[in-house]
Amino acid sequence: MAPAQLCAQTRASRFFINLSMPATLPPSSGEVKSLKTRGEIGKGQKGSSHKKEGRKMRDESPEPMDSHKCRVCRFPLLVAILQLLLGVAITAVAFLMLAISPSLLTRETPHWAGIILCLVSIVGFILYCINYLPDERSSMQFIVKFLYFVLCAIGLVISVVVMAFAGHHYSQASSFSCDEVEEACMCTLNPGDPIARTFTYEGVSDCEVINGTLTLYFLLQIVLNLVQALVCAVGAFIMWKHRYQVFFTGLQIGSPSFQHWQKV
């Protein structure tokens, strides 16, 4: 077959192939709009599905660790309540001791210690009302936490000092030998010693009050201040532990704001 005939057949086959293939026309403006709207609808459905999944994950997320605990048992509310109750008890016992005789010294009636510890408990209540943020992001939170830690340490020292004075006076009052002189009670540790120190309690008509009731009050002050010292020590230790032994990984569960965090 000649080359000219081959070329003619090839052109004819190409012509028939082009006729058999459908022509591709550009999409109209209406079709373009419909495609755009379908894409937007698909994106909206995907976005709503993602939102629903995120809401479901938040709903199914675990609750905070202390959600099932009583609110009174939380720190520092429990410590502050104990400090307030013990401070009021110490102050009341001190005023009862002062009612026995106005001659009692300030170190023998530690009402000042009870008032200071009541102020410490008020700072604890303020700390409980402040929203807890990790790493002390709030200056108010840092100041109140530091102040409460310092006051707990001071309360511990005060309670130990009161216990020392109360123990000393308890040992003295339990071994007193007292005599009534007009409207006062003269007490001494060693009646046979002419140069022994004499303690005078004015306004006491019955010396049995000194050997009995006053001794009981001293013992009660020892017990109350011992418990108060333990409570203040626990409060200071927990504050130190929260500052130096608890680390936050930044996990945030169930809340978009940064005011509710969970320790992990």
Image (cartoon, helix red, strand yellow):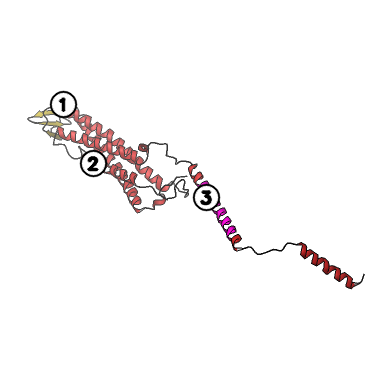
Query: Vertical placement of 259 versus 109: above or below?
Result: below
- Please tell me which residue is depicted at 84% across the width and 68% down the height of the picture: 10
Q: Is residue 159 magenta?
A: no
Q: Residues within 10 Å of mark 3 (few under 14, many from 20)?
A: few
Q: Amino acid at mark 3?
A: Ser
Mark 1 lies on a secondary structure that is: helix
Residue 195 visible: no
| Residue topped by disc 3 | 48
Query: For residue 180, what is the image quadrant?
Result: top left
| Residue topped by disc 1 | 208
Q: What is the distance, in whole Å, between disc 2 and disc 3 at their CAs?
A: 60 Å
Q: Amino acid at mark 1?
A: Glu
Q: What is the distance, in whole Å, between disc 2 and disc 1 at their CAs?
A: 30 Å
Instruction: Indicate which label's residue lies in the foreground, 2 or 1.
Output: 2
- Please tell me which residue is depicted at 48% across the width and 43% down the height of the picture: 59
**Magenta part of the chain:** 33-54
Instruction: Indicate which label's residue lies in the foreground, 3 or 1.
Output: 3
Q: Amino acid at mark 2?
A: Ile
| Residue topped by disc 2 | 115
Mark 3 lies on a secondary structure that is: helix
